[in-house]
Structures are given as structure tokens and as C-alpha cells.
Image (cartoon, rainbow, N blue to C red):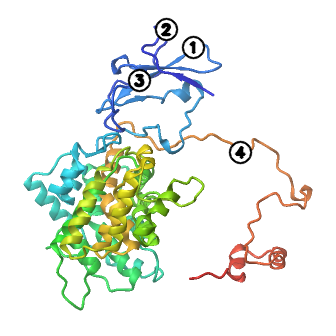
Amino acid sequence: MTLAELLPACEPACQPAMEHTEAAEPAAKAPAGPVDAAPAAEEGVAKLILPGFSEPLCLPLLQDAAGALFIDVRSLQPKTGVCTFDPGFTSTAACESGITFTDGDAGRLLYRGYPVEQLAERGDYLDTAYLLLHGELPTKLQRRRFENEVRHHSLVHEQLIQFFKGFKHDAHPMAIMVGVAGALSAFYEYDSSAHSPEGQLEACVRLISKMPTLAALAFKTSRGLPIVYPRNDLGFAENLLYMMQAVPCEPYKVDPIRARALEKVLVLYADHEQNASTCTVRTAGSSQANPFACIASGIAALWGPAHGGANEAVLRMLMDIGGVDRIPEVIARAKDRDDPFRLYGFGHRVYKTFDPRSRVMKAVADELLEATGIDHDPLLTIAVALERAALADPYFASHRLYPNVEFYSGIVLRALGIPISMFTVIFSVARTAGWVSQWREMVNEGQHKITRPRQMYTGKLERSFVPISRRGEAAHIPDTASPTASDAEQQLLADLGEPEYLRTVSVKPARSGL
């Protein structure tokens, strides 16, 4: 094991392992106060004492724009052969970024320095997308040009639409999105070796503009409904609602209140620092992959219930609770470590107080339900009661388990008439602006390197191959036989040497309630 010590200063004989004087852009949370036992930024080094080494190793200290300190360990492995071990990268900054900043202790989220609450209340999604891409809010002329570009890139190739017809009629919309987003790379070539700023920006705009169209097509396909093409006279959120909810046989007018509510949802979800899906996009992009394929990888990562699928899980949880009278039981189960029940929508890996997006999302839910006349939604009643009970319980306060953005976003999307299966799809539409901005920033880094993390190997070391004639009869691998097949059936299939795909069709599946 290693022992690291942060000292006020290093001995004169100890030299920094690598010179790195540039301050990093915002990439981590700002400390709530002074960092105890840490050197001042100008002192610039941290001393690492390793067993078996005669001298300590000095590693440069970096400081970001918010004052957070980082130890530069890039020279650690080349000089010592020692690696850091940090599963989930909870204490590792994998990049420098100037796009999004989160302060978990203070409950702040900034896009290029602007509080997300202000952008949601005063701006719209295209303002936010332009800001994330370019670093500044657009002027009036820039806004008109950007809006025009997004509108006129919203159509997709007619041959791509044929892809949707190949999916199973009840396929999950996210499964469709993963496939068709990656398929865009077959229709729009991108030369990663050229590093053309114009080509990069065009790919980013195409993705932002086409994602609502892909989302609506995925929804229509999953329901067996005829597709509806985008309209250039509608705004971004209006177009998404129109393509999802309109049908060719009757006129459809977009409700401005619903469109504005969706606009706020899109802004709140536009970016969130180095989360799982954003890291996936950056990792794929580090290999110089096509940007459309990179975004497809982000969609796949977003699908998980621990990430983008959390709002879907919240709504299903509220439906399972069923009534306010069960809230005490739910609270008790959530606090019981031996109970597998999980309370979705509370707590966040980053925020140690209220998620700043959750307050805006709750206000959106209240306004939408009141304006649309659905002011007695039973799920909202359960959600409010659950929030009050949790906040009043000392356990939740002591563990800093506050409502996050997913807690109310499911209610908002439900009130908009969007089905549960589409929740994560809407999230992916919103997050595209953040993904392409992070991708564009990454490919333009001066010190671009392919992502290649190391591992702490726990398997067997080198051993010699044993011929089949010298191996015993006993099994040395886990039994993966289907639990629905009899021992006789499994033995017969094994004796016949049938391939696995034949075994799958020859064994009857277990009965289920589906």
C-alpha cells in the first residue's frame, strides 16, 4: 500500500516530477472553505512517500478556476511503476474543461458561468446549446443564424427512415435511438484527420437538430404510428412535441404552455459536467471516432437506470407506492440497509444539498399541472407527500439525501403526455448539446491522447496450457445451463455438440406473466 502526504512545502532536494504551470479550467467542485492540511496553490507541489523508495516524489499541484486543488499524477507511473486506484473516478479529474461547473456543497450548476436556473427561466434551449458550443450567449444576428441552421438540418435522409421499419414493433425507443444515431455516420461523412473547425461545428449542429426528429421517429415506430415530419415554422421544443403527438389525419396545434415547460426540461438536462455518458462520449471521441458514433455511445450509457433512466424509475416507484398512506412504510424501508428497496429521486453523487435543477423542475411541474387543469394528479400528490416526509426525517438530512432533478421531471413529462418509455429519449435529446460541446472541446485539446485507463489485475498469472487429453472430467467453469432445461436435455445437447443458438430455440422458456 502507498502512503501519500500533502505537506506545506517540499524539501529543496525534492524536484517536481513534471513541469505543468497552466491552471486547469473548471473540472471539479469548489471547496466549501479552506482545504485543511493542503499547501497553498503557489507552493505548487505535493510529496508522495512510497515504501521501497529512498526519496519522496514531488507531484505538481494544479488549481482550477474555482480554487479546487488537483494533484498531477501523470508522471507517477512512468517514474515509479505505481498507479493510482480509483474505481468510478470519484477522485480523478480525467480532463480539463471550461463548459460546465458543479458545486455540490453549495448546490450550484453553471453553464459557461451562467446559473442553470437563469437559463431555464429567461432563455431557451437554442440559447443554451449555442452557449455550450461557443462559450458565450449569441448576439441577435448569431441567434438568427444558429436557429436557421438547426431548423434546416432537422430532416433526416429518407433511407435512414427505412432503418426504423426494421425494428421490432414494440422495441424500446432507447434501443432504436442507439442504433439510428450511430447510423447517421453512414449518411454524413466526417474526416477526423482533417480537424476542420467548420466540419466539427457542422457535425455538432446536425446532431442537435436531428435528435428531436430521431426521437419522434423512435416513438412513432414503437407505437406503430405514421411518422410526422418537422416544420420550419416551429421552435425547437414545439417541433419535438408536434412530431411526437401530431397525426396526419387531423390538425394539431402546439400548446405554448406545454412547449415552454418542455423547453425548461431540455435546458435543465443540457449538460452536467463529466457524468457517465459524457465520459463515454469523450472516451469514444479520443479514438477519433465519427462524432455520430460517439453520441450513440453516450445514448447507450445514458440508458441505464442509474443515469438517464432514473426519472423513469422514479415514476414507476411512485406508481408502485400507490397512495399517500404507504409513505411511512416506504420511508422505513428506504432506511433499512437490509431491505433491497431503493428510493429513487433522492440524493446525488455530486450535490450534498438540493440539486439546483430540482427546484426549477418542481416549479415547472406545479405551473404545468395548474395551467393544464391537471392539478390533482395522484402521482404528484404522492411525490409531494414523499418529499415532505423525507425532508422531515433526520435520517435523510444527516445523509444529505435531498430530492434531485429526476424526482419531479417524470411528473412533468407525464403531464406533457410523454410515455414513460420516452423519458430517457427526451433526456438524450437535451443532453446532445452538452455531448457535442464536450466532444468538440476534447478533439481540440492541445495534448490529445486516447483514453487508456490502467487496471489492478486480480486474475491468475502465467500458466501452461493443458491439452484436452490430460484434463479431468469434472467441470471447472460455472454451470451456465438454462434453469428451464432438464439435466437429460442438457446432456443430450452437449453430447450432440449443438451450437448455442440451437440450444436456445430447443429449450422451452420459463413461464412468466407477460
The x and y percentages for residue 366 are 24, 65
Circle on res. 459: 4
Q: CA distance from mark 2 to mark 1?
A: 9 Å
| Left or right: 316, with 434 as reference point | right
Residue occupying the point 77% across, 64% down: 479
Q: Amino acid at mark 1?
A: Glu
Circle on res. 36: 3
Q: Residues within 10 Å of mark 2 (few under 14, many from 20)?
A: few
Label 1, on which residue? 55
Label 2, on which residue? 13
Q: Secondary structure at mark 4?
A: loop
| In the image, residue 139 above or below residue 148 | above
Q: Residues within 10 Å of mark 4 (few under 14, many from 20)?
A: few
Quadrant of the frame with the N terminus: top right
Q: Are marks 2 and 1 in contact (CB under 8 Å)?
A: yes
First in sequence, mark 2 or 4: give its number: 2
Q: Amino acid at mark 2?
A: Ala
Q: CA distance from mark 3 to mark 4?
A: 39 Å
First in sequence, mark 3 or 4: give its number: 3
Q: Quadrant of residue 383?
A: bottom left
Q: CA distance from mark 2 to mark 4?
A: 40 Å
Q: Are marks 2 and 4 in contact (CB under 8 Å)?
A: no
